[in-house]
Amino acid sequence: MTVELPGLVVVLCGPSGAGKSTLIARLRDELGAQLRFSVSYTTRPPRTGERDGVDYFFVDRPAFEELVADGAFLEHAIVHTNMYGTHRQQVEDLAAGGAVVVLDIDVQGAAQVRATSADVVFVFVLPPSVEELERRLRGRATDTDEVIRGRLGVARAEMSEAPLFDYAVVNDDLERAAADVAAIVRAERLRRAKDGTAARFA
Ligand code: 5GP
């Protein structure tokens, strides 16, 4: 007999430089087609290689504000001067189809989801150390010293929120961190499957 695993919404949060995007890419290999990424809306211009509708939906400020006014967002926030938002309907549709829906959002967004949505799993992704975080942020050669110092300050403040999350995953070893998230997903889906499974024997 197999247990039918229900859809699950997982919020992955953590400071810029914690390696969330790489972790999500590795998680795709681990979970395969069951993983679906919530594609956020943003007013940030695309970076080289980013594709509209894949990495983000890139919109201008008036379009973003219209979506806010329509109540289209499950959460939205200003991060590093740009606006970001998670489309409620997109997440609901994906989860209803039985997928594991991963949201890569900041701590402000996570707080909004925590306040408004039940049954969501919150995972905080930590860099191995503050020194390693600084090294990773400096590795992005595009940023000035001032920007890096600013990001480090924000990262420290964000990391102080880790205790509010259900799980903490340290991203020091990508394979292990991805396996940790996959284990969380498996356990949380099995926890949610128990009612449906029991009903089949009633
Ligand atoms: P980036 O511009 O580097 O892709 O993302 C900057 C930050 O914005 C990251 O911490 C990322 O998690 C966060 N972010 C991306 N999408 C959303 C979203 O829809 N909502 C919120 N609150 N944060 C987001």
Image: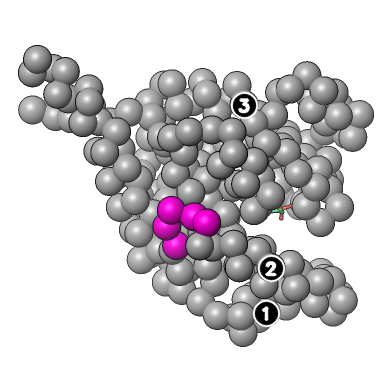
* Amino acid identity at mark 3: Arg
The image shows residue 29 at horizontal and vertical percentages of 39, 49
* Amino acid identity at mark 2: Ala
Q: Could you say which is closer to the camera, residue 196 or residue 56?
A: 196
Name the N-terminal-most of marks 2 and 3.
3
Is 105 part of what is drawn in magenta?
Answer: no
Q: Using the image, tell me which numbered label, if any, was put on residue 4.
A: none
Please give the range of residues in magenta. 164-168
The image shows residue 27 at horizontal and vertical percentages of 42, 51
- Does 39 sit left or right of 126 as displayed? right
Above or below 162: residue 89 = above
Tell whether label 1 touches label 2 (CB within 8 Å): no
Q: Could you say which is closer to the camera, residue 24 or residue 3?
A: 3
Q: Secondary structure at mark 1?
A: helix
Residue furthest toward the right? 62
* Amino acid identity at mark 1: Glu
The image shows residue 87 at horizontal and vertical percentages of 65, 29
- Specify few, some or many for label 3: CA neighbours under 10 Å numbering under 14, 14-19, or 20 or more: some
Q: Residue at x 49, y 25 (%)?
A: 94
Q: Residue at x 66, y 45 (%)?
A: 109
- Does 64 sit left or right of 90 as displayed? right
Q: Which residue is mark 2?
A: 157
- Does 16 sit left or right of 33 as displayed? right
Q: Residue at x 76, y 44 (%)?
A: 77
Name the N-terminal-most of marks 3 and 1.
3
Q: Which residue is mark 3?
A: 88
Q: Secondary structure at mark 3?
A: helix
- Specify few, some or many for label 1: CA neighbours under 10 Å numbering under 14, 14-19, or 20 or more: some
Q: Which residue is mark 1?
A: 134
Above or below 98: residue 184 = below
Residue 65 figure quarter: top right
